[in-house]
Every structure is written in C-alpha cells, then in structure tokens.
Image (cartoon, helix red, strand yellow):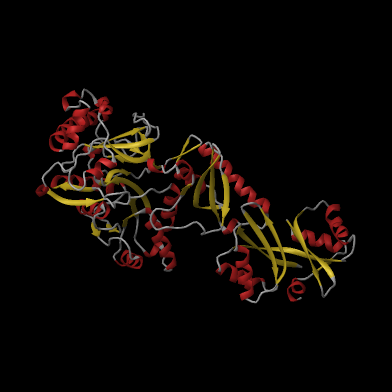
Amino acid sequence: MQVKQISIFVENRAGRLEEISGVLEKENINIRALSLADTSDFGIIRLIVNKPDAAVTALREAGFTIRESNVIACAIEDKPGGLHRLLKLFADLDVSIEYMYSFFERHLEKAVIIIRVEDPEEAIQILRKGGAELLKAEQIYAA
Amino acid sequence: MLIWDKTAETMPRDRLRKVQFDRLKHILGYASEKVPFYRESLKRHGITPRSLTSMDDLSLIPFTNKADMQASYPYDMFAIPLEDVVRIHSSSGTTGKPTVVGYSRNDLNVWSDLIARLLTAGGVTRKDIVQIAFGYGLFTGGFGLHYGVEKIGATVIPVSSGNTDRQLMIMKDFHSTALVCTPSYALYLSEALEEAHMRPEDLRLRVGLFGAEPWTENMRREIEKKLRISATDNYGLSEVMGPGVSMECLCKNGMHINEDHFIAEIIDPETGNVLPYGETGELVITTLTKEAIPVIRYRTRDIASLIDTPCDCGRTFIRMTKPQGRTDDMLIIRGVNVFPSQIETVLIEIEETDPHYQLVITREGAMDELEIRVEVNESFFSDEMKKMREIEEKIRQKVRNALGISAHIKLVEPKSIERSIGKAKRVIDMRAFHQGAP
C-alpha cells in the first residue's frame, strides 16, 4: 500500500530543475506527481514517477542527491468535502501529516492525495478503518 | 617508549635553557659576522651577543620575515661560501619567489639526527622497512626523511610521490612496515587500498609518519582505522631546515620541539609581543646550530600554541600544537579574528555534513556578512524540510559557539564546491571589491 517517492536536493540556481526533467525524459520516465518545498537557498523536489528504480539510478548517475521514501496514496471524490473527510480521519486520532500534495487521476476520475507521515503502517490502518480508498503502487505507476 | 638521543631529549630544563642561551649568543655573533642582512638589522636594534643578559632578551631581537628570505634570492642569506654548501633545497614558490636553502655537511648530519629522533618518537626502529612517498627533489620532505631512516639503520624504500598502484604493490610485496607521506596522501592510499579489494591484513604496515601539511584528529582516526597503523604528526619548514623541527611521540599530544637546535616562541601576529605558554598566536623559530643559513626569529606564519606540561614519554622538550591555520588566512569579520580552519574543525564534528565548505564574506552597509556554504551528505539528506532546517540550525549554533560570530548557513549539493588538488579555494572575500584591493 506504500508508494515510492523520490526526493531530490536542489540548490536554487537557474537551470537545475530543467536538468532533472531532462534526465527523466531521456530515460523515458513519466512524472505522475510533483511537489516542491523551498527556502531561499535550496529546495526539495518530491516526485512520484512510473519507474522509480530507473529514475533513482539515472538521477544518481547525473550527480543528484536523492532520498527514497514511502508515501501513501489515497483516492478521494473530486467534490467539495472530499479532502475534508480524509483529513478528519487523521485529526480524530491526532496523527500528524508531515506534508501532502495532490493530482487528478483521469482513469479513476478521482483526486489522488499523496501523504507523508512518520509511521506509514499506522496511517494505513487508520485509513482502512475509516474506509478510505488506498491506492496500490502499481495503480499509480501504471496509469 | 624509545628515545633516539636520551641525553639531549630528556635534558633537565635548566640545563637546556643554558644550552639554548649559549647557542643563541653564538649564533647571533655568527650571523652578524657572516650575513650582511643580520649584521645590519642587529646593528640597527643595538643587539650584540654581549648585550644579551638572559633568554628574556630574545624578545628584543628583530624578526625575520618571509619577505626578507625572498629578497635574499638566491644566496644572500648564506653564511658559508658555496663551496662548503653540500645540498640545496627550495620552497615551491607558490607565494612569490622560491626560498632557496642550503646545508653544510654538518647541517645535514644534524638534520639526519633530528629525523632519527622523529622516526624513533613515532615508533620506527632499525627493524622497520620505511616506504617514503614524499617527493624526492627540491622539496625537503623526501631527502630529509631518507637520511634519517638510514641513520637509524632501518631499510628505506625511496618510492617518492605518486603512482598509487605502484605504492600499494611495493607496500605489499616489499613488506613495508612504516609509511612516510602527507596525511592526505595516506588517506588517499587507504581508499585506494579498499578500491583494489585489498585489506590492511594484506600489508605489514604498523606505523605512519605524516607531515608537510595540516591535518585533524579526525583524519588521524580515519587513517589509523583504515590502515591499522599508529599515525604521528611532525612539523618543519624549509626556511629553518625542513621536517624535524618538531615531532609527536606516541603519546600523541603535541609535537616536541627539538629545543637544543631551535627556540620556539609564540607571538601576537598583530603586535609582535611574545605570548605565554598555552596562548595561541604565530610561531616564531630561531635556529641555534644551522651553519649554512642561520635564521633568527623567523615568523613562520603558522598559528599554534606551546605546551610546557611534562609529557609521559620522558622527553623534556616543550610541545607545539598542530598548526591551526596561517596568519595569511586570517580573516577579520566584524572585528573578530577568524581562521577558516576553525570552521573546518566545527564541520568535522557534525556528521550530517562533509567538511567541504566555502566562506563568502560580503559587506552590507557597514556590516560584514559571513556565509558558509556546506555540502550536504547524501546519507543525511531528508525529504522533510524541517529536518534540513535542523541541520542548518545545528551548524549555525556550533559556528557561533566556536567563533563568536553568527553566519548564514547555505546547504549546497555534494561535490558542488570546487576541489583543487593544491590549495582549495576556501574563501571568497567580496569586501575587497568595495574597499579597493587589500
């Protein structure tokens, strides 16, 4: 139930992001979702891609500093209140979310929320009990 | 623990002071008689051997600077005719004209004797096979160590520097038990050993004597662990002789200065005042026995302090700390003296970063700003911004504690700071552009 996320350390300088997308294009890797956290000096790019292992190898070879981590992907109704129902499951049990981001999945016709928590196993239990729709890694990569 | 020259190296302090004083008076007379530079500078300050009443008068004698040595290029500092000079060495000349140094027959005898002390202090005996990976040539390291090894009757392998594969092959096949080179090359060899799928057990190496550049305790631990040896430091500079001015014993708590041949002082680099033992400042050295080039109160530009507490090894010679920087490297930021090596020391203690850094100093209005660029270490890179900010904050705090000034910490990608084989470009001082060239 966990999805592999690739995080990349990037200095804030012109052209650095383009180098990342260039590596991925060359390896024919599709980006499914992306988020960027930044300070004035550096940023952390988080990516969900269709071929995580190949992406890690290629990016490392290109000299990027990389961290692999596991995140959870939940499908929610793309309607008012959809996200709220999901977040309430965490809030009720006082589980904090490190960060999250989202994208629209056209095959499922749903929004997908990527969630990073301290303890993914615990979060999966909570989400299951609450009836959330967890997506398998293959569902994310294959689409 | 073994001592090469017990009589000299364990001489009671009061007797040593007398030896030093007698030799100082002799060398002053000798230098002013034979070298015009000293004749004039001593005369200008009214110094004669007779005017010295005690060792405290040493502080009245004028300093000799690097520039004085350079101005004497090539032979003006020589106190003996060239026909009596049996060897010439020279500095690299990276900071201007090279400094040419000569040795009489007796200078070479003394030098090998001091190297014999150095080797013995580091644990080398006549049974050892010593691989010298210092360059043989104008640099004092190779030939300097070479004759000391022969003097103690050990076996010397004069490989000289470079060709790492061959170094490893010789080390293994010739059963080298001692390694002489720069600490950074020792570390490089240990990495090459791993890459060649060799283990320290495949070698018979037991001791390493490393010098000619500054290194840290962390580097020592790493070299000792990777090569499974005991590593000691030694110090010297070509202007006063070369390696053998001071050396660590196996207690590894500072380098004993061969005080029967050299007087060491620590001065405030700004005022020139002599500082007491324990205080950090610029190391000044006077040679007491050199014939070809006597050197009086030479400002080494190395920053160190002197330790006069007794050492467990039994040697009575005082010790000096590892040089902590160079006076030429000293930066004044917001009125505080800062040495780049202090920042390196801080970074080495922080496991989340590699000790690759660059200092950028700018001026905003009247205020100096220090930015420290530090390479992140991939094993500590986190996808959580919070954790990355914690690393920055940790560095900021430790730098503030160590230097007393705050700095902006900028994390940069690994290997993004330029590596140069020689002197790394550690400091970018942008203030120079505003103030006119320094």
Splitting the image into 4 quarters, where does residue B319 fall? Answer: top left
Q: Residue B214: x percent and y percent?
A: 38, 48
Nearer-the-camera pick, B332 or B283:
B332
Nearer-the-camera pick, A91 or A129:
A91
Task: Left or right? Give the position of B128 relative to A66.
Answer: left
Q: Residue B349: x percent and y percent?
A: 52, 47
Above or below A31: residue B294: above
Above or below B36: residue B120: below
Above or below A80: residue B298: above
Which residue is at 25% across, 51% downward? B140
User: Dividing the image into 4 quarters, which one contains the N terminus of chain A?
Assistant: bottom right
User: Dividing the image into 4 quarters, which one contains the C terminus of chain A?
Assistant: bottom right
Which residue is at 71% across, 63% downward? A70
Q: Residue B176: x percent and y percent?
A: 30, 61
Task: Left or right? Give the position of B83 relative to B346.
Answer: left
Above or below B372: residue B289: above
Residue, far right: A80
Task: Left or right? Give the position of B62 relative to A77.
Answer: left
Which residue is at 25% across, 45% downward? B70
Task: Left or right? Give the position of B429 relative to A87.
Answer: left
Q: Residue B260: x percent and y percent?
A: 23, 36
Q: Is residue B148 visible?
A: no
Splitting the image into 4 quarters, where does residue B207 fall? Answer: bottom left
Q: Can residue B90 be seen in this view?
A: yes
Please tell me how many numbered marks the rendered image carries: 0
Splitting the image into 4 quarters, where does residue B137 fall? Answer: bottom left
